[in-house]
Image (spheres, helix red, strand yellow):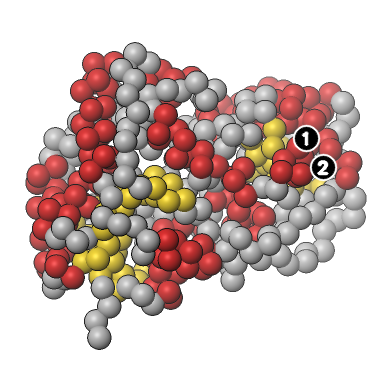
Amino acid sequence: MKRPIYLYITPFFPSVAKWEGAYCYDAVKALIENGKYDIRVFTGGNGEDYEYNGIVVHTFKTRELPSAIFPFLFAKWNQKSFLAAVRRTCIDTDQVAICHAHTATYGIYALLLKGLNKNCLTLLHHHDMASFGLNIGCMRHFWLYNLIQFPILRRMHEKIDCHVFVSEASRRSFLFAPDTSWSVYPDYKKQMRGLPYRRVKIKNSLILHNGVDVGLFKPQIIQRAQGGFTIGCIGNFQVPKGQMVLLKAVEILGRRGRIMGDGRVKVVFVGSGSEKAKCEKYAKEKGLDVEFRSEVRHEELVDFYRTLDLFVLPSYFEGFGCVYAEAWACGVPFIACEGQGIADLIPEVDRVKWLVQPNDAGSLARAIDNFLLYHPKQYLSGEIAIKPLIEEFVCNLSRIRI
């Protein structure tokens, strides 16, 4: 007996050339292992179909203006391209039970399938704190542009059968748009400024945290230099990721004699991005003894986590943050900011030591100092493992009425 078809459509899926979208790969792998659906993966782009670790990824050509200005301008053309790719793979649209699209601009593909098959359940997956869809490109701060785009996006969102969020924080930010009173990120506030307030009315929603492959990310005892303490930070160097906040916290701790260049405490940054040069310059000017490394492939991160005593990423605009879950799975305690997605999974009694005030170097310095004094350890309880999260997600899908 043939299984119902589950279309998974995402702009983020890894390949041999790039590792971005590793969380999508882990989710697809878990969906395949679940066995209920015949999973087919599609991604937009101009390349050919490819295979990644046994998963076939079908590519369809897309058109867009530079900087994704007016992202739906070529919607009809892109939909036809997607449908052609679906038919090229001999998929009968009447057999598609679920069409799971990622990011706001990919919602058009789910709705296309819905128009062809009214029994198809449409899902739209939101990954960050600005997932409504106005945070794209160089026009995101222009009020008139956003005034045009906002109702287009709202109408599309209201047609989707079920919205999937990576955290309660991500769901909150989406449902509150264009209200930004909850955020401390000036850029996001500027994007939403002046838009007419009318909350989007969605049909259904589910939470699916970005799970971890605990077969890969798991604790391992490594011999470290006696008396040493290593703090690690992994992330794209962008303003809201908070690497500059961490550097300022390191500076504060240095003035207190807590961070010293004798090997006792080591701080290592991993990543790339537009703010990296600024962070490197700041560290040099302040004489901070920190190390900057280039990004590595996702599967290589586990070796880095295992060298750490503490993971710190003071991101204050974070839908979930896979790196926290990966560190946790490796047995490494971490520090994040209050109000972000990872807070969903932190026990109430532990929040005082795991979470700090957003964009506050003093609060972060105090939290790091506490870890330096007490070296607390806490291990993954299993709730961030991808397989049980997907099992629960698939079970919840069966309860949605369309």
Quadrant in the picture for residue 371? top right
Residue under circle 1? 367
Residue 112 position within the rendered picture, expressed as x and y whole percent measured from the top left:
15, 52
Which residue is at 22% across, 35% downward?
155
385 left or right of 115?
Answer: right
Query: Closest to the observer: 248 or 381?
Result: 381
Disc 1 and disc 2 in contact, CB within 8 angstroms: yes
Quadrant in the picture for residue 203? top left
Q: Amino acid at mark 2?
A: Phe
Q: Give the quarter of the figure containing the C terminus.
A: bottom left
Query: Closest to the observer: 4 or 24?
Result: 4
Which residue is at 68% across, 62% downward?
381
Which residue is at 52% across, 28% downward?
239
54 left or right of 146?
Answer: right
Residue under circle 2? 371
Q: Is residue 11 visible?
A: no
Residue 124 position within the rendered picture, expressed as x and y whole percent measured from the top left:
32, 49
Query: Closest to the observer: 4 or 57?
Result: 4
Residue lying at the far bottom of the rendered structure: 1
Q: Residues within 10 Å of mark 2 (few under 14, many from 20)?
A: some
Residue 28 position within the rendered picture, expressed as x and y whole percent measured from the top left:
39, 65
Which residue is at 63% across, 34% downward?
338
Q: Is residue 37 above or below residue 326?
A: below
Q: Is residue 286 above or below residue 194?
A: below
Distance between mark 1 and mark 2 Cα atoms: 7 Å
Q: Amino acid at mark 1?
A: Ala
Q: Give the quarter of the figure containing the N terminus.
A: bottom left
Could you say which disc has been placed on residue 74 in the image?
none
291 left or right of 171?
Answer: right
